[in-house]
Image: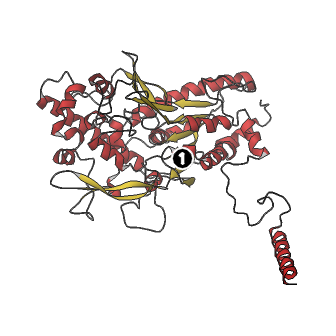
Amino acid sequence: MSIIRNVFFTSLITLSVIMFMGCSSTDPSTGSYNSAAVYDRPLYSTIARNSMAYEGIYRNPVIVVHGFLGAKLKSSTTGEPVWGNFTGRETISGFADYQLLQFALPMAKDKTLKELKDHVYADELLESFTVKVLGMQFSLNAYNKMLDILREAGYTQEGKPLPPDKHFYSLFTFYYDWRRDIPENAAKLHEFILQKRAYLQQEYKKLYGIDNYNVQFDVVAHSMGGMVSRYYLRYGNQDLPADGSMPKLDWFGSNYIDKLVIVGTPNAGYLDTFVELTSGLQVDPNAPVYPPAVIGTFPTYYQMLPLNSTRSVVYADDPKGKAVDLFDPREWIKNKWGLADPNNDEVLQKIIPNVKTPEERRAVALDHLAKCLKRAKQFTDALRIEATPPDDVNLYLFLGDAVPTRRTAAVDRNTGTFEITDYEAGDGKVLASSARMDEREGQPWTPFMKSPIKWQTVVHLSAAHMGITLSKDFADNVVFFLLENPTKNQQISVKKYQTNPTK
């Protein structure tokens, strides 16, 4: 009798659970109010798939702008790769002299940073990265996954065969020499946009009979590429004024950019730039280390230093005092950091071989350091000006906040050596607060985010710096922002051309 009673109550409980769940399907999540299932990819609706299949004037073309280290560099004199595919001639302990000479930017006392040019150029986007050391090959993901996301969303990448149902390219990659000054590369981005705009206007004329269509671009920019794109959006192709003043904030880039999607960008700088300028750059544990004196020739490193307001670098005996001024060359000389380290001469001989004496080489190095820091301060001040973008531009931010990321370096005032004393939420390279440019970092706490950047949407992801671009949540959201969240310009276009046929 007790067995019958137990079976009855068990059956009654089971029936109650089924009725409560309201689920008549064999899939426990279908029709369920309380399913806790989590999935690794979206199930795109018919509406979303139609948006992906659409080709026409209402859909903005996309430009991908890579970050630091994100383009292959090649020598125009030797034809050999300078960055992006190690040849196997390197050792785990270092590089050949000629490789350091090619990788470093020129330095000279009598020239501006813009005038210091070499024979190295950006050859192509770094979709993947290959390291060959001691006979072993290592392949690392770069931008191939980001491009996959956009191709799967229906964009047609320039340089690839056009699918049978497509008539023009709608996905472009802007690659540039990431060693060089950010405003200089912003000017190159403007030239690139004008070229692609002219191409698309020609195609729209052939297909739709529309003259001089106002082509707008959506830009997806990763890491340092976000700083290039933000400068362009604000100042267009303006250079920083030679007198140290601010460029005119005219939002020139908004004439061509409709949506700017920024991914893992160090808008308030990141501490690893300081660490690498003083200790060297090693992109992977299996790769050799570039000496500090070599990467210290790159203006971009200084333009991504953490802002003084974040108090990322402090003296150990005064941790609650003001930050070390990273834009003051006297601090670098006093602490023997980077190009100011007196022990650099062996490397300096290799990268400025025409300068004959150690004293002259040190003078050139210190002059270059001062020029880079001065321009970096001017650049970061220009991007820090609080301003609201035009209402026809949407700003989106994706960032990682799941990896302990270097937050504070404490410096020994007597020796200049430092140690990392604090970590905070970030993507392993960039703090979440830096990506948001949240000016509460390093300052007294207040309840709400305080940023000079007027973000329309901020999306936090549990991902590392490059892992953001591999995230299914990134893919799902970025496709929606690009394809189905219209800007003012797109709404105007729909009203103006709604009777025009599209293919």
* Total numbered circles: 1
Quarter holding the C terminus? Answer: top right
Query: Residue 191: where, in percent of width, then height?
Result: 50, 27
Query: Residue 156: where, in percent of width, then height?
Result: 65, 29
Q: In the drawing, does residue 144 fall left or right of residue 319?
A: right
Label 1 element class: helix
Query: Residue 466: where, in percent of width, then height?
Result: 50, 43
Q: Nearer the viewer, residue 427 or 218?
A: 427
Q: Is residue 339 above or below residue 331?
A: above
| View extreme (bottom): residue | 1
Q: Nearer the viewer, residue 226 or 131?
A: 131
Query: Which amino acid does the dot numbered 1 rest on?
Result: Ile
Q: Is residue 118 above or below residue 387?
A: above
Quarter holding the N terminus? Answer: bottom right
Query: Is residue 256 shown to the viewer in this render?
Result: no
Q: Nearer the viewer, residue 384 or 222?
A: 222
Q: In the drawing, does residue 97 fall left or right of residue 89?
A: left
Instruction: Report the residue at 37% width, 35% height from top.
Output: 287
Q: Residue 425, located in which quarter of the rendered image?
A: bottom left
Q: Residues within 10 Å of mark 1 (few under 14, many from 20)?
A: many
Q: Which residue is mark 1?
A: 468
Instruction: Report the residue at 79% width, 44% height from top.
Output: 46
Q: Is residue 252 above or below residue 408?
A: above
